[in-house]
Structure formats: C-alpha cells, structure tokens
Image (tube, helix red, strand yellow):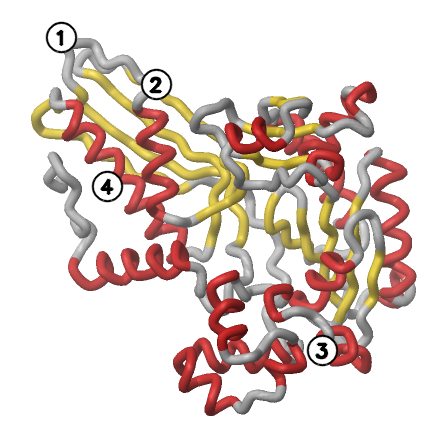
C-alpha cells in the first residue's frame, strides 16, 4: 500500500494569532519576541520579514532592523489553545497525528481512502478547512513520506498547497538548493558547496562511497537517502501530556549561590539526557526550589521552539533561578529541574548542526562516565 503523509505548517503562527485577536495589527510588521536585551524573536509576520527579521534573532537586532515593528510578548497559552483546535481538525481524518511543534504536524493518511476519499482530496479539504474554522492561514504538503511532505509544505509557503506524487519525487527535488533538504544545515551545505555540490541533483550524482568518505558512514548514507527522497520514518501519534524532571534533596542545605546555580545546571543536563533517551523535545522548562523552612517556589518559562539541547535547557533553568530570591538566613534544601510540553523529536538525520553534535557528545560522555560529567564549577554531584 502506498504511503501518503500530510504536513501542515501554520504560517507565522504566533504573529498570526496576535493579528487574529488584534485585527488592527493586520498588514503591519508584528514581531513576537522576548524582552530586550536578552530576548529572542519567536515569530515575525511576513511584513516584518521584509525588513530582515527572522525567528531566533536577538530582539535588540530586530528592533534595529524594524524600529516601526509591533513587538509583543509571547502568549503561549493562547497559542496552545489554537494549536489544540488545529489538532482536533487533523484528528478527524486520521488517528495518526504527530505534532512536531505548536505550529506543525504530520498526519498519516495511508489507508484512509475508504473513509475520506483520495489523499489529494483530503489535503485540499484540510487546506481550506483550517483557515475557515480557525481564522489562521496554513501551508499544506502531501507526499509519500514525512521528508517529502515537509518539503512540499515549505515550497507552498505562505498559504499554499503542494502535492508530490511518487513519480514526481526527483523532478521536485533535483532543482532545489541542497540547503533546502530537510535535515541539512548551513555548515553541511557550505561543505558541499566547497565540493561544487549546490543542488539536490548535484548531490544525487555523487556516489555513496564518496559521500561516506567525506561525511562518515552514517552521514554519507543519510545524504544519499535525502537526495533520493527516501524516508521510512513513521508518523508517531502525540503522547499523553507528561513531564520529565530530576530533583535532589541535599543532606546539608546549600548556601553558596555559585553551588546552587551549578546544581541547577547539572539537573538540567540530566533532564536533557532523559529527553534524548525517550526521543522527546520540550518547550517548557521548570525549576523547583525548596528552602530550609520547607517553603517551595516554582518557576517556568516557554521556549520559542522545542529542544532537547542540554546547554539551552541549562541556560533557561539558570535564568529561572536568577528570578528566585533566596533569603540570606535560609539555605536551599531541594532543587529540581523539569521539562514539559513534550513533542516527539524532530527529524534530524545527520546531526550536522554544531549544537546538535555537541549535545549528542555530552550525552554520550555522561553515558560512559556517569551523570556527574561534565563537572560544574562550584558543585559536586549528589
């Protein structure tokens, strides 16, 4: 039976929700971002993107590029509400719905023809139904696997629909720049460009043995498969909401701020290990602090994108700790770090981004030498 996978990607989702709730913002450069100087852009409307504003950009840079922009703080509860509406629509067509963030999801339509008709018809119906029922624009891609469905929706942005049939795979992929292949990052694209490989067709014409000599066995095989649109990754339905956490009660209260901060970072690394083991990404980071008198405080923050990266999680946890005022006459009895709003890990076949490789290396080091590695200044593992 031929596979049919649908990918839905909401267009400038956070900014679009803000425009839905504030019609006066429509047609203006809307930028959803954390506060300067340390905040980053979560989403920019297409009007803001004309000024060069992009997701992940420091807020201060976005302010320089687009001083007339409407800067708004994220409202994740509202975005989650709209994401649930979208997911409910998708689940009418298949039980196999895999969110990969609040604004993206895969749907496995394989074998649903008797219930809903041809997948092409379903894709068209979903493409019309989501804007009609939610007031939000979406891009939809349909293809024989997740890779091609995702790339089809990317090519249809904003607001379009693209169907890639099995016989069209190479004609669709070949003209594309290699950096548009889902899973290839800027560094890999740059290495390929150095070797004269700029399009997917160029990449497809390189032998498997040569690719493996350049990128190693795993990396070479992944590139060879990407160039041919091969992907057997299944659509994994969303898990029940849960969280992953690590906490420690100390035999002697902690008073040293440096040691307390180091412990929070250590716990965050343990949470990152669990996320990687369970192939999950988290979009919420939480901390718990219990003082000598058993008073307990919790803090949490939402991330612009789900992650399992230990350094990012540790930095967010440390930032939350800085918002906790620790009484000078009390020590810390317990510390905890948690991750919530969990999603199945994104498709990352090559792990070729520097931060992804670093995170994986740290995970492997701790698997080999124990959870106390790396050691953090001012702290000893409990």
Give above or below for 91 relative to 96: above
Q: Quadrant of the C terminus?
A: top left
Q: What element carries label 3?
A: loop
- Among numbered discs 2 and 1, the one appearing first in the sequence: 2
Residue at 17% in and 56% down: 370
- The residue indicated by pointer 2 is 323
Q: Which of marks 2 and 1 is in front?
A: 2
Label 4: which residue? Answer: 266
Contact, CB < 8 Å: mark 4 with mark 2? no
Q: Are marks 2 and 3 in contact (CB under 8 Å)?
A: no
Rendered view: 6 above or below 270:
below
- Looking at the image, residue 241 sits to the left or right of residue 260; the answer is right
Residue 229 as seen in the image, left or right of residue 308: right
Point 45% across, 57% down: residue: 279
Q: Where is residue 311 in the image (x, y as percent from the top left)?
A: 33, 45
With 68 as the anchor, is 252 left or right in this view?
left
Between the C-alphas of marks 3 and 4, the distance is 45 Å
In this view, the mark in front (4 or 2) = 2
Distance from the alpha carbon under mark 2 to that under mark 1? 18 Å
Residue 140 vs residue 105, the one in the foreground: 140
Reading the image, the residue beneath label 3 is 174
* Mark 3 → mark 1, Cα distance in angstroms: 67 Å
């Amino acid at each position: 039976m031929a596979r049919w996978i649908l990918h839905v990607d909401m267009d400038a989702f956070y900014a679009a929700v803000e425009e839905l709730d504030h019609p006066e913002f429509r047609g203006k450069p809307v930028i959803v971002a954390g506060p300067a100087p340390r905040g980053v852009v979560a989403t920019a409307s297409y009007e803001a993107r004309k000024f060069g504003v992009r997701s992940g950009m420091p807020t201060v840079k976005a302010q320089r590029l687009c001083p007339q922009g409407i800067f708004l703080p994220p409202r994740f509860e509202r975005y989650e509400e709209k994401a649930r509406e979208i997911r409910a629509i998708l689940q009418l067509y298949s039980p196999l719905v895999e969110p990969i963030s609040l604004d993206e999801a895969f749907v496995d339509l394989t074998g649903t023809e008797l219930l809903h008709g041809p997948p092409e018809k379903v894709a068209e119906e979903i493409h019309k139904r989501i804007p009609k029922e939610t007031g939000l624009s979406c891009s939809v891609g349909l293809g024989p696997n997740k890779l091609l469905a995702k790339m089809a929706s990317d090519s249809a942005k904003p607001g379009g629909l693209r169907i890639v049939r099995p016989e069209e795979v190479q004609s669709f992929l070949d003209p594309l720049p290699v950096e548009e292949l889902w899973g290839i990052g800027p560094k890999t694209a740059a290495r390929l460009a150095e070797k004269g490989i700029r399009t997917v067709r160029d990449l497809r014409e390189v032998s498997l043995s040569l690719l493996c000599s350049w990128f190693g066995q795993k990396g070479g095989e992944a590139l060879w498969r990407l160039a041919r649109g091969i992907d057997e990754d299944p659509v994994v339905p969303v898990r029940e909401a849960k969280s992953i956490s690590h906490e420690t009660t100390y035999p002697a209260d902690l008073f040293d701020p440096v040691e307390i901060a180091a412990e929070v970072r250590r716990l965050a690394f343990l949470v990152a290990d669990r996320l990687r083991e369970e192939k999950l990404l988290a979009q919420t980071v939480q901390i718990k602090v219990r003082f000598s008198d058993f008073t307990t405080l919790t803090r949490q923050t939402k991330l612009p994108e789900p992650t399992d990266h230990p350094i990012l999680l540790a930095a967010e946890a440390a930032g939350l700790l800085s918002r906790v005022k620790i009484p000078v006459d009390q020590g810390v009895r317990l510390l905890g770090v948690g991750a919530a709003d969990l999603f199945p890990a994104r498709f990352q076949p090559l792990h070729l981004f520097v931060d992804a490789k670093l995170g994986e290396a740290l995970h492997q080091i701790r698997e080999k030498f124990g959870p106390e590695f790396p050691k953090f200044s001012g702290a000893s593992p409990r």
